[in-house]
Structures are given as structure tokens and as C-alpha cells.
Image (spheres, rainbow, N blue to C red):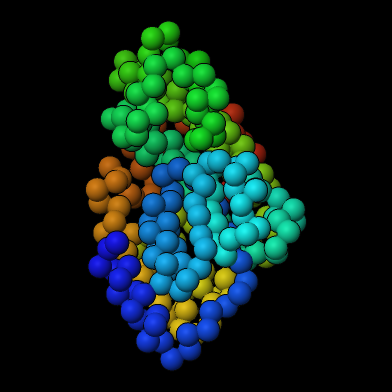
């Protein structure tokens, strides 16, 4: 238990308005898009206020089964039809330029930051927990990290794009016709502006005055610009301009033209 978690719980117990709001909350995002930061804030807030919360990574089946019984839930890399959620939660979605997601993911997976990156000869079911495809660039006897370290930059980026195809299809589904009651926040509008961004989330979630104050305090304590430093190589927006060779940029736009149109990233 962190010092901030303990302090948040103590602050809540001493709040002038300790009654908590009852509307359930769901949050959606994508790998390399402030997922760890949001989860730190939400987990600390849930603990302090006595809420039942869980993050399901990319396990959409478990999310669908458990979400109706939870106060707060989150899942990554999937589209979810909000109308099918029986408890009518308040929903939020973080999005980021998908080309920056490719760059961030490429360097993250190339250094083998997670155990599954080192799995040799993965089958599609082995990567279901990250909702990702096995790139055709992978050779027999290789892990994803091995593959990315073998390939030159352009081919490695294409392998990362293939790996994230399901993620980008899900993002396009979200953005093609977003529900009116879904709060969408962009990565570049959050980073460095966490107080305003998380205040917008608190208002959208229907938190009361005491909850909003606590939520903001926790978000400030875990300021993304601080917590990202050990997890992310480069948190800046638009880095794809410096990394994508021209042929990769063209191939991406050709493959995901709908996503680029829906997302508004040019």
C-alpha cells in the first residue's frame, strides 16, 4: 500500500461529505495510452472510498461477466457496446494518435518489457490477454522481442502495426459513431494538463464534491508526467513524424484510412 493510498483513505474518512455517489463507472483505453496512470488513480480512489473496482487488461470476456457487479471497471484494446451494459455506467475513453501508439509500442516490445514478449512461437490464443495478432514477420523459434530486434526499423514498425490490428479496429469502432454519453479525452489534452482532464472525468462520472476533491488530489499525486518517466521511452505527441519512414506512413494510412478519418489525426 502506497503512502498516497493511505493518505487518500484518511482524507476520505475525514471528508465533510462522506456519502459516495452510486453510479457505476467504466473506462476504456489502449496499450501505451496512459493506462497505468489512470489505473493508479482509479485504484487508489476506489480503495479510499470503499468501491469495488477491477481492471481487466484486454480480457473482454471476464470484463463482461464481472462489470455489472462492480462500482468501477476498465478494459483495454476492445470496443464495447455501452447499450449492452446492464447497469448503465458512466463511460470514458482515452484515445491517442495510433501512429504514436505504434512507435511507443514498438520500442516497448523491442526491449521485451513484458513476459509475454519473450514467448517463443506464440499462437493467437497466447496473446488473447492483450487482444493482439501474431505478426506475419515472425519466424519459427522467435519471440516478438526477438523478431523486432532482428528486423530493420521499417519492417519492425510494420510488425508492430500488424500486432496492433485488433486495437486499431476497436478504436475505429469507438470513433465511427461515438455514443453521446461517452466522454472521450485525447492523450495530448491530458498529458501536462491532468488536473483539468481528471476534473472533467469526475464531473462526467457524477462524483459528489468530496469525491471530486479526492479524485483531483490523487490525480495530482500520480501526475502522469511523473509516473510515466520509468514506463515510457518518450511520452511526447507526434513522435511518429521522427520515426516512421515514408513507406511505413503510407502503408499505415492505406490500411487504416477509416481510423485516421474518424480519429481526426492527420
Residue 190 point in image, percent of width and height: 42, 62
Q: Hey, which quadrant is residue 220 in on the image?
A: bottom left
Q: Is residue 120 visible?
A: yes
Please report the residue visible at 41 percent of the width from the left and 44 percent of the height from the top. Answer: 32
Query: At 63% across and 41% down in the image, what residue appears?
Result: 61
The residue sitting at 43% across, 91% down in the picture is 16
User: Which x, y percent locates residue 238?
Assistant: 39, 46
Residue under the point 70% across and 64% down: 88
> Which residue in the rendered view is the most extreme toward the top?
140
Where does residue 42 sit, x and y in percent of width and height?
A: 44, 63
Residue closer to the observer: 252 or 125: 125
Where 135 falls versus 222 (above or below)? Answer: above
Tell me the quarter of the image containing the N terminus.
bottom left
Query: Who is closer to the viewer here, 192 or 8?
Result: 8
Residue 244 position within the rendered picture, expressed as x and y whole percent measured from the top left: 39, 31
Query: Vertical placement of 8 versus 148: above or below?
Result: below
Is residue 231 shown above or below 128? below
State left or right for residue 160 relative to residue 225: right
Residue 248 visible at all: no
Camera-side residue: 199 or 62? 62
Q: How many marks?
A: 0
Left/right of residue 195 with respect to residue 86 in the rendered view: left
Q: Residue furthest bottom?
A: 16
Q: Is residue 212 left or right of residue 26?
A: left
From this view, report whether residue 127 is shown above or below residue 16.
above
Instruction: Please tell me which residue lies in front, 164 or 240.
Output: 164
Amino acid at each position: 500500500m502506497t503512502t498516497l493510498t493511505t493518505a487518500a483513505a484518511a482524507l476520505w474518512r475525514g471528508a465533510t461529505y462522506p456519502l459516495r455517489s452510486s453510479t457505476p463507472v467504466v473506462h476504456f483505453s489502449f496499450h501505451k495510452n496512459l493506462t497505468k496512470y489512470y489505473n493508479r488513480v482509479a485504484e487508489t480512489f476506489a480503495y479510499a472510498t470503499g468501491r469495488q473496482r477491477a481492471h481487466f487488461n484486454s480480457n473482454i470476456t471476464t470484463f463482461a461477466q464481472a462489470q455489472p457487479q462492480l462500482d468501477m471497471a476498465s478494459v483495454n484494446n476492445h470496443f464495447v457496446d455501452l447499450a449492452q451494459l446492464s447497469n448503465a455506467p458512466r463511460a470514458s475513453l482515452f484515445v491517442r494518435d495510433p501512429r504514436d501508439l505504434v512507435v511507443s509500442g514498438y520500442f516497448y516490445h523491442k526491449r521485451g518489457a513484458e513476459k509475454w514478449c519473450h514467448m517463443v512461437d506464440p499462437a493467437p490464443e497466447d496473446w488473447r490477454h492483450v487482444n493482439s495478432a501474431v505478426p506475419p514477420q515472425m519466424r519459427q523459434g522467435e519471440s516478438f522481442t526477438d523478431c523486432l530486434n532482428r528486423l530493420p526499423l521499417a519492417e519492425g514498425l510494420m510488425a508492430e502495426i500488424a500486432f496492433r490490428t485488433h486495437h486499431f479496429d476497436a478504436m475505429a469502432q469507438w470513433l465511427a459513431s461515438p455514443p453521446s454519453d461517452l466522454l472521450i479525452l485525447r492523450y495530448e489534452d491530458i498529458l501536462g494538463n491532468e488536473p483539468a482532464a481528471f476534473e472533467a472525468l469526475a464531473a462526467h462520472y457524477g462524483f459528489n464534491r468530496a469525491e471530486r476533491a479526492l479524485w483531483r488530489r490523487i490525480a495530482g499525486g500520480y501526475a502522469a508526467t511523473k509516473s510515466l518517466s520509468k514506463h515510457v521511452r518518450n511520452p511526447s505527441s507526434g513522435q511518429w513524424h521522427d520515426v516512421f519512414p515514408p513507406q511505413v506512413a503510407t502503408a499505415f494510412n492505406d490500411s487504416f484510412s477509416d481510423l485516421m478519418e474518424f480519429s481526426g489525426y492527420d
